[in-house]
Image (tube, rainbow, N blue to C red):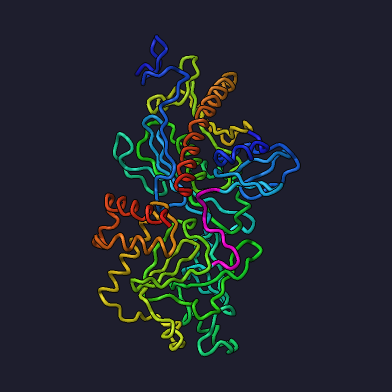
C-alpha cells in the first residue's frame, strides 16, 4: 500500500503500520516523528497510525511515554535537589528541571532570590515531594523546564496520587477541578493525577506562607474514604481506556455510590460501572 | 546415547528437520511496564518487560548523544529439570544479556533519546533450548509494544546439523548432545542484515552456509508471527482508544 492510497484507506479505517513498514518511496515527502529515511524511502519505526499533514508524514504510536509541550499542566515528583535546580520525574523520557528562579518564593512574589535561598532549597521542595507545575520551555536535549509561578501551582499535600495512561488525560482549559463530592483533583497531562481534600481557594491565598508546608491538614475518615473512592474511580477509567475528565470522573463516582469504595475495582462491578458510565457519556 | 534423528527422518520430539516448534506470543501483558511481551517457543517460555526511555539511574552510564540500553536476564529456579537457583552474577546469564544488548544497540534508534535509559528485563520461566533466540524475539515484541522506535524487527532462530541433515530450532535434548553443532542467528528481515551470529561448536566450513540459510528461513517465519502479534495488539489498542 502506498501513501497515495492513504486518503482512500482513511475513509475506511486508519492505516496501521509496524516497524520497518515501507510508507512511501516518493522523494517529495518529508519524514516526521516515528519514521526514518533510508535510500530516499520513508519507513515506519514504531507501530501505530500513519498521519499526513501536507508533505509531512509521521507515525503516531498508541503507547508512548509522555511528550511534553509548552503550556502543559503536569504533576511531578522531585527526584533530586541540585544547585539552583530540582530534577522532577514527570513520566517522560528524561526528568524535567525546575529552576530555583522559576518558583514563587515565600513572602511575596516580588522578593528577589538571595544566596540563602539557594542554601535552603530543601525547605521548599525536597526529594519525594509532589509538585503541580506548568511546562515553561524545552532544553536542547528535549528535557522540560517547569515553573510554578502562580498561586494555584506549587507543592501538593492532603491527598494521594494515581498514575494513569498519559493519553487518557486530554489537554483542556482547566486541569484543576473541585468535584461536587468535596474532593479536589489535579489532572496532570503526563498521566499523574492528584486527588486531595478540598481546600477553598480563599484559605490557600490567606495562608500564602504555608505553600511549602509538609504537614497535612486534618482529614476526617469520611474525607479519606471519598478520596479513596475517587482514586478507585480514576483507576477504573484507566483500566477501561475511557478518557479521564471531570465529567467522566463524576459519572463514575455517582455510579459507584451503590458499592463500597474497595469493591469498585472488582472485576464484575467494574465492568458494570463502566457500561453505565459509557452509556451516560454517549448520551451527552 | 539417544537417537536424535529416527530412520524415518523425524526428530526426538516428532518434528521434521526443517520444522520450527509451535510459537505463541502476546504483547502488552503487564500493566506496570511501558512495554511487555510473553513468548513461547515450544516449551521455552519467557516474559519480558521494557521500561523506558527514562532518566538514567546511574550517572556513569549517561551518554550525551544517545540512550543507554540496560539488559537483565534472569532464569527461574524451576525452569530446568534440576531445580537450581542461579546467582545474579552467573557468567552464562551475563553473557546472554550482553549478547541481547549488542543485538539491539544498532537497531533501536537511541539517538532520539539523549541521556536516557531503556531497561529490558527478561525472565525465563521454562527452559527447553534456544534461550537466546526466544529472548531476542520476545524483547523485539516488548520494545515495539513500548513504542520505542526501531529500524526493523529483530528475528532470531537456531539451526544445527545432525547426521548430514540441517535441522531447525533445536530443543534442549538436541542442544545438549555434544556432537550437534548449534548456531544462533538474528536477522533484520527487511534488509536481510545479520544482527547476531553465535556458534560455540565445531562445524565444517562447507556446511556453515547451508545451516545459515536454513536458520534465516526460520527467521522469516518468526517475523511473520511477531508481525501478526504486533498488528493484533495495535489494532486492539486503536479500537480501545477510539471507542
Q: Can you name the residue that lies furthest to the right here?
A: A28
Determine if residue A229 is in view: yes
Image quadrant occupied by the N terminus of chain B = top left
Pick the residue in front: B57 or B205: B57
The part of the chain drawn in magenta is A61-72
Q: On the rendered structure, is B206 left or right of B38?
A: right
Q: On the rendered structure, is B140 left or right of A199?
A: right
Percent from the top left, x then y, of residue A150? Answer: 53, 79
Q: Could you say which quadrant of the image residue A38 lies in?
A: top right
Q: Relative to B180, does residue A165 appear above or below in the rendering? A: below
Percent from the top left, x then y, of residue B32? Answer: 40, 53
Name the residue: 50% across, 81% down. A151
Q: Could you say which quadrant of the image residue B26 lies in?
A: top left
Magenta includes A131?
no
Name the residue: 35% across, 64% down. A231
Name the residue: 51% across, 90% down. A107
Name the residue: 48% across, 27% down. B182
Determine if residue B72 is in view: no
Give the overall secondary structure of the magenta segment: loop
Q: Relative to A60, does residue B218 appear above or below in the rendering? A: above
Q: Can you name the residue that lies furthest to the front here?
A: A283
Q: On the rendered structure, is A195 left or right of A35?
A: left
Amino acid at each position: 500500500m502506498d501513501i497515495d492510497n492513504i486518503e482512500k484507506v482513511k475513509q475506511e479505517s486508519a492505516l496501521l503500520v509496524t516497524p520497518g513498514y515501507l510508507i512511501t518511496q516518493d522523494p517529495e515527502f518529508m519524514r516526521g516523528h516515528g519514521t526514518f529515511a533510508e535510500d530516499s524511502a520513508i519507513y515506519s519505526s514504531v507501530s501505530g497510525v500513519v498521519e499526513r499533514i501536507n508533505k509531512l508524514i509521521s507515525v503516531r504510536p498508541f503507547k508512548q511515554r509522555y511528550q511534553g509541550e509548552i503550556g502543559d499542566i503536569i504533576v511531578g515528583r522531585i527526584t533530586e535537589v541540585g544547585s539552583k535546580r530540582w530534577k522532577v520525574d514527570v513520566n517522560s523520557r528524561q526528568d524535567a528541571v525546575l529552576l530555583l528562579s522559576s518558583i514563587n518564593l515565600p513572602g511575596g512574589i516580588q522578593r528577589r532570590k538571595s544566596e540563602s535561598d539557594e542554601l535552603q532549597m530543601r525547605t521548599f521542595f525536597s526529594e519525594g515531594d509532589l509538585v503541580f507545575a506548568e511546562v515553561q520551555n524545552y532544553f536542547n536535549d528535549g528535557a522540560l523546564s517547569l515553573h510554578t509561578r502562580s498561586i494555584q501551582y506549587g507543592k501538593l499535600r492532603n491527598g494521594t496520587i494515581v498514575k494513569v495512561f498519559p493519553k487518557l488525560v486530554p489537554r483542556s482549559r482547566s486541569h484543576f477541578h473541585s468535584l461536587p463530592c468535596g474532593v479536589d483533583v489535579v489532572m496532570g497531562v503526563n498521566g499523574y493525577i492528584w486527588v486531595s481534600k478540598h481546600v477553598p481557594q480563599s484559605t490557600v491565598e490567606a495562608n500564602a506562607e504555608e505553600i511549602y508546608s509538609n504537614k497535612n491538614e486534618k482529614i476526617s475518615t469520611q474525607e479519606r474514604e471519598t478520596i479513596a473512592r475517587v482514586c478507585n474511580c480514576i483507576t477504573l477509567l484507566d483500566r477501561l481506556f475511557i478518557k479521564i475528565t471531570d465529567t467522566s470522573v463524576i459519572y463514575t463516582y455517582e455510579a459507584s455510590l451503590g458499592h463500597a469504595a474497595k469493591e469498585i475495582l472488582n472485576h464484575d462491578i467494574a465492568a458494570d460501572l463502566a457500561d453505565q458510565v459509557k452509556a451516560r457519556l454517549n448520551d451527552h | 546415547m539417544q537417537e536424535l534423528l529416527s530412520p524415518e527422518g523425524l526428530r526426538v520430539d516428532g518434528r521434521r528437520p526443517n520444522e520450527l516448534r509451535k510459537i505463541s506470543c502476546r504483547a502488552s501483558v503487564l500493566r506496570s511496564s511501558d512495554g511487555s511481551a510473553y513468548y513461547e517457543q515450544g516449551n521455552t517460555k519467557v516474559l519480558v518487560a521494557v521500561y523506558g526511555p527514562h532518566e538514567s539511574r546511574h550517572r556513569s552510564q549517561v551518554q550525551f548523544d544517545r540512550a543507554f540500553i540496560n539488559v537483565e536476564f534472569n532464569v527461574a529456579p524451576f525452569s530446568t529439570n534440576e531445580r537450581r537457583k542461579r546467582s545474579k552474577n552467573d557468567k552464562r546469564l551475563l553473557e546472554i544479556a550482553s549478547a541481547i544488548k549488542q543485538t539491539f544497540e544498532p537497531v533501536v534508534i537511541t539517538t532520539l533519546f539523549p541521556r536516557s535509559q531503556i531497561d529490558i528485563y527478561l525472565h525465563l520461566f521454562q527452559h527447553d533450548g534456544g534461550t537466546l533466540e526466544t529472548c531476542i524475539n520476545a524483547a523485539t515484541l516488548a520494545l515495539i509494544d513500548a513504542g520505542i522506535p526501531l529500524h526493523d524487527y529483530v528475528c532470531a532462530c537456531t539451526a544445527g546439523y545432525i547426521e548430514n541433515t540441517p535441522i531447525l530450532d533445536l530443543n534442549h535434548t538436541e542442544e545438549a548432545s555434544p556432537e550437534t553443532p548449534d548456531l544462533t542467528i538474528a536477522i533484520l528481515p527487511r534488509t536481510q542484515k545479520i544482527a547476531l551470529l553465535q556458534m560455540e561448536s565445531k562445524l565444517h566450513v562447507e556446511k556453515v552456509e547451508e545451516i545459515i540459510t536454513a536458520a534465516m528461513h526460520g527467521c522469516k517465519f518468526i517475523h511473520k508471527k511477531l508481525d501478526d502479534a504486533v498488528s493484533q495488539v495495535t489494532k486492539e489498542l486503536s479500537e480501545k482508544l477510539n471507542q
